[in-house]
Every structure is written in structure tokens, then in C-alpha cells.
Amino acid sequence: MSTSSRFHLRVRKVWSTKGKKVVFSAMPLKGALKASAKKYFVVHANLDDLPVMPVKGQEWRISGTKTETADNSKEYKQTRIDIQAKRLRVTMPNNGDNFVEFVAEDKEFVGIGPVFARKLWDKFQELQLDIYQTLNDGKTEMLELVLTPKTAQTMVDAWKKYSNLKHLHWFAEHSVPPYISSKIMKHHSEEAVEQVKANPFILQAFGMSFDDITVLAREHFDIERDDPRRLTAAVAEALYKFTSKRGHTVATHRDLKRLLYKVLNCDVLAKQALMTSHENSDFIIDDDGNYHPTGPLVMEKVVAQRFLHLANHKDTWDGRFDEALAHGLKDLAFPLMERQAEAVCSSLINPISVLTGGAGTGKTTVLRVILRAYEKLGYKTYPMALAGRAAKRIKEGTGYHASTIAGFLKNVEIKDDEQAVIVIDEASMVDLKTMFQLVMALHDNVRILLVGDPAQLSPIGYGLILHDVVKTNSIANTELNIVKRQKGSTGIPEFTLAVRNGQIPEINTPNIRFHYTDKHQINDKVASLYAQDPLNSQIVGAKYSIKDGGINHINHICQKDCNPEGQRLEFEMFGESRHLNIRVNDPIIFTENSWDDDIQNGTMGRLISVGGKSEFGAVELDDGRVIELNESLILIVQPAYAVSLHKAQGSQFPRVIITLIDDPMLDRSWIYTALTRAEQQIEIVGTPEQFEVAIRRPSAASLRKTTLHKLLAA
């Protein structure tokens, strides 16, 4: 039975902040309900109702309905009180013990542990001063009686989210979620509230969706469907969908009008929105009548400017380069072919250059020579790739340490006086935002070498870099186009080259097999092939949730066939017993970045134990590291008998099993990229018609609309 009540609670542990719900355990404060070891409280709150995200040690006044249930899962009986919160407000601790816990547990108070928190509270009590008022005033002098000036300033900065509680409560009352309101108040003044009142659609800039703002605007601000503020925001939403969701960086009038109709669900409003937004200059219209959202256009211009700056400082070949080339060629097993030698020389005299070519054309050999030559010239080299497996392959192929691009951006700072060259392998995967981040992190004279294959899949994110660069003559580009067949060759490079050129190849090698399979039998066929050589095989697919050929279904069957007895990953989380459908010895993949754990989206490995000191389990990664799973990683790990091709891009495997389905996603670049993941053996499962249709279908990159190539050609 549920009853309405009011509570004054202290947060003990935040259980879940995923999705639209936040769940945390709490204990009653003195003066409210009497604390008892026989009872514990679990608060369930809507994300939109919170002024700030809960943190252990915070105190909250909560009104809502409670439900009591007996919890017999532990050795002693407890009563669990679940509170469905209706209204929540943060209050400040009023005694030393609670203040110490509050400050010590909030990660934003960097460098202020329990000892200094206690000293602060005691000092202010001794001086009969209000520590909260001091923090609200933003003055550090009194704090420096205990803390260093730097730590005092850190505390004042971290306190801002609490000093603005009255505004954060206002946002919560107007259905603005805390992850939005906290960003606003952290970087903007109190005038932000007035700005939101004047135009709530500015919340788009902080990550709130157009549809959510539309509801908020109507309920709290009486803004109608045809209000100019809403129509202007609709254009921004349409451009966002066309760029971030589809990969383009520019839209035609027709593109925008079609999307605007979907956003507004009204042709009249769509036409009106284009006129309104044009008058408000929310985007740029070029001479050809194309629409450019400001952000991507700025990024493309910055990248183009840096590329052209480097291209205009070409060196003249002299004796230094002769010595460097000789050093690079030293101990090479085979002499370079003419085109390969041209690629080396081009990269040495051009501060920015491109090396392209398909599988088996010798890009890795050329890259090794280039890196050795640059080393002789006195340059520090920074090889990198988007995926961890690709970075590992650079090290294996060249002998030079390589990092992920994310790792480079996080951990490396090239000094202004340092002679340096960055080498980006698998550059076809790099999107505009990533390239912009790299350019902004480098001083003007850091050299850039892009290595990759524009015939592969286009980036997941918006924009094109490698594909656009090779369209122009302003950046030096050498394409390696000869597949050098060696004794004992698998035949895979020749096969993939035909696909790259849009030809339907013949299968004349035992290393490539085609398995004609009806779609209703494809899951079982793929799983049986995998079971023949599990340790060396990787299945790649296009879609996760479909029944026939879907990655999720194939993972389930492979686990049942290959690892049915493995111990299941079970754990306690958010106060409940849970499990993932992953077993010890299952291959796994992480599907999001976790910088604190040095995990990138697409990192693969194998579950080697469950339980243990982490309470979850341990994973051995493909790079040899063993990591303990934690509450963050457990939410982003999946089985990986089968993975999407985008996850596999940048990696190679001894044996690749390719799952064909009837879907426009399967185009020439998809097939080609899938084939080139294999080192020794390819198994293609599906029908010849699916294979041929995909090869004849134009690649997604050729349909992506961008501006960088025009800026480079200007």
C-alpha cells in the first residue's frame, strides 16, 4: 500500500542515473524519521524533477509516496521503503559530520578530502562565520586559512552549482533536467534564467531536444506552434538531424524543407520556418543556395585553413632528405616499387600529404620507411589510429609505438618549438569533429600524414576528411594501386581489389568461400562456421536487432553452441541481483568510451573471470591488458561473437565471417571493408544476389554532402 509522506534524507549511494530515472539509497536525518538498521530507503525520481544530480552526502527534502516491503535477501530482515518522489529540494548539511561527508564525496571538490573538510568546518565554527555564505560570495581569503589558494579557488568554483540552487530549483520546476541546468549555471551568469524565460529554445544549445522544449515551452511559457522562436529552433533541429544524424555538413533547400516538414509535421510551418530562420541568420546560405549549420562550417574552414597552410610550405629536396631516405630504406627486406618510393619522397617534402591504397599494396611497408626517415630528420613521430586494434597493428607493422587518437588528445601535448609529425592510419574512419580537435591541439607547423583507403566505410560522425582530401589537387596524394602477389598469398588482396573497383570477383582460392544460404537459415549457418575455429574467427554484421542475420541473435546462438557451460556474469547493482548474458570465456566488446578506464568504443577482449575483488569480473583485452569491470564498464559491455562492421573497422582478424542481409546499408564500401578485415580466411554467408547488389550500390561516402573539398580547392 502506498501513502503520501515527506522525508528529510541524506544520500547514501547513487544506484542508477541512466535514462529518465534516477535511483539512490538514503537514510533519514535526525529530527526527521528515526534512523534504524532495520529500514533503508530507496528514492526513485524523474530526471527532469531534479535540480542537481544526487551525490553521496547530500541532504534532500522529498515529498512523494512510499511503499514498504520486506527484504529477506540478507542474513537479517530489513524493511525496504521505496519512495516515488514528486518534489525534491537540496538542503545544506547543518553539522560538521554531515558537511565532511558531503564535501568529501562530491567529486567536484577536487583535493578536499575528509581531513581538510573537517578543518574547514571547525575553523568557521571557531570564528562564528557562515561557510556557506563565504562560498556563495566566491571569496577565497577565509578558505585560505585552511586550504592552499589553488584548492580554495577550486572549492569556490565547484560550489557554484550549489550557490545557484534557487535557479536550479526554478529549472527543475519548469521541467529542465539537471544535466542541462547544471551546464547552464556552470558556464553562464544568473541572467541565463531570464534568457530562458525570453526564449526557452536556447536550451537546444545545451543538449535538450526540440520536442522536449516544445512541450516545456507550451506548458510553462504559452509558446504556440507558429511562434517565431519555435520555427527558428525547428530549422536548427532539421540541420542537426541532417548533419549529426546523417553525416552531412551542408543541406540543399530541398533537403532542409523535407526534414522541416518531419520536425514540424506541417508544410505551411516548414515554409514559414525557412523564412523566419533566414531573417534571424541562424545558418549561412552560400552562393549555390546551400544551407550550412554554423558549427560544422566553422570546423571545415579551420581544418581547410590548416591543411592549406601546411600545403603551402613545401620543402625543396636536398642532401638532408637523401640521408633520411637512405636511413629509412636500410634493412628493408625488399626494394620499394616506384610508386612506393614516390610516396615516401612526397611525404618527406610535403608538410601535409596523403598515402592511399587498398589491401596488399604495401602501405605498412611505406609507412615504416617514412617513420624511420622522419626520425633521421630530427622529427618526433606520433603514429595514431581511431581504433585500439589499428594502433596495435601500426606497432606490429612498423615497430613504432602508436596510440589511439583519443589517447593522443588526452595525454600528449606537442610543444611549440618541437619538430613533429602526426601519422593518422585508417584515416577514412576519422570524422570532421575529430580532425578539428586534432588541428586545434597542434601548433601550426606540426606535419600531418593521412594514411588510409577512401574506398572503405565513411566515418560514423559527420563530415569527410580522407575522402574529401583525395578529391582535390591542393594536398599531395600518392595512391598505391599495385597488389604485389607473393608466394603463399591468400588471394584476398586481389579479390578485394576487384570489389574496390566495382567488379564482381570470381572465387578461385580456398581462402575465400561463399556459402549460399537462405535468410531463414543464416543465423545457424554463421554460428556453425564460427564453431569450426572460434579462437581465430570474427563475425561481422550490419544490424543488431533483426531476426535473420541480426548480430544479437547470432551472439545468442554462438554462445549456446560454443560456451554453454561458462559461468554467467552475475552481480549486485542498484540494490538488486542482476546479470548480463555474458559468460566466462565469451568474447566481449565495449560499446562506448570510458576515458577513466582507458577504454575506447570498439575495444575488444574476453571475459576471464566473474566476481573477485571488482565484484563484477575481469576482462583480458586484445592488447594484453587485464582490467577489472566496474559499475561504469558493466553498462557498456556486450558479447562479441558477432559485431557490427563499424565496430570492427580498423581491426583485422585471421578469419572473418561476413553476414549478408537485404539492406541499403550494404553497399560497395561495406562489402569491401568487411572483406579487408580478414588476414587469412573469408567466409561469406548469404546469396550471390545480395553480394552483387551490394557491390553495385554506390558507397555511402559518395552520397554524403560536405564542403571541405570545395574549401581545399578554392
Image (spheres, rainbow, N blue to C red):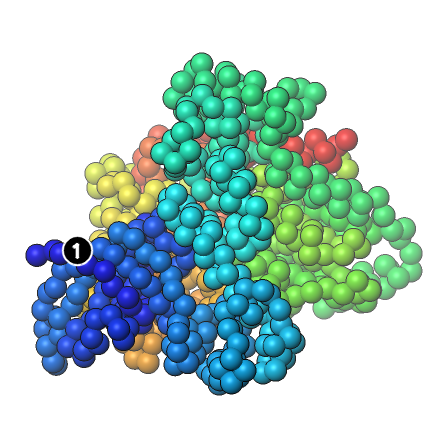
Residue 147 is left or right of residue 687, and the answer is: right
Q: Name the residue under label 1.
A: 4
Q: Where is residue 337 in the image (x, y as percent from the top left)?
A: 71, 51
Q: Where is residue 345 in the image (x, y as percent from the top left)?
A: 79, 52
Vertical arrangement, residue 409 with respect to residue 623, above or below: above
Residue pictured at 51% horizontal, 34% vertical: 199
Quadrant placement of the C terminus: top right
Residue 672: tell me if it is visible. no
Residue pictured at 33% horizontal, 63% vertical: 60
Q: Nearer the viewer, residue 36 or 248?
A: 36
Quadrant of res 655 = bottom left
Q: Nearer the viewer, residue 323 or 349?
A: 349
Q: Nearer the viewer, residue 657 or 231?
A: 231
Quadrant of res 471 = top right
Q: Position of residue 43 (x, y in %)?
A: 25, 61
Q: What element carries label 1?
A: strand
Kind of residue at badge 1: Ser
Residue pictured at 12% horizontal, 81% vertical: 75
Task: Work out which residue is located at the far front of the displayed protein and give it.
Answer: 128
Residue 381 is left or right of residue 556, and the answer is: right
Residue pictured at 39% horizontal, 74% vertical: 94
Q: Position of residue 430 (x, y in %)?
A: 58, 48
Task: Work out which residue is located at the far top of the displayed protein and give it.
Answer: 268
Residue 128 is left or right of residue 2, and the answer is: right
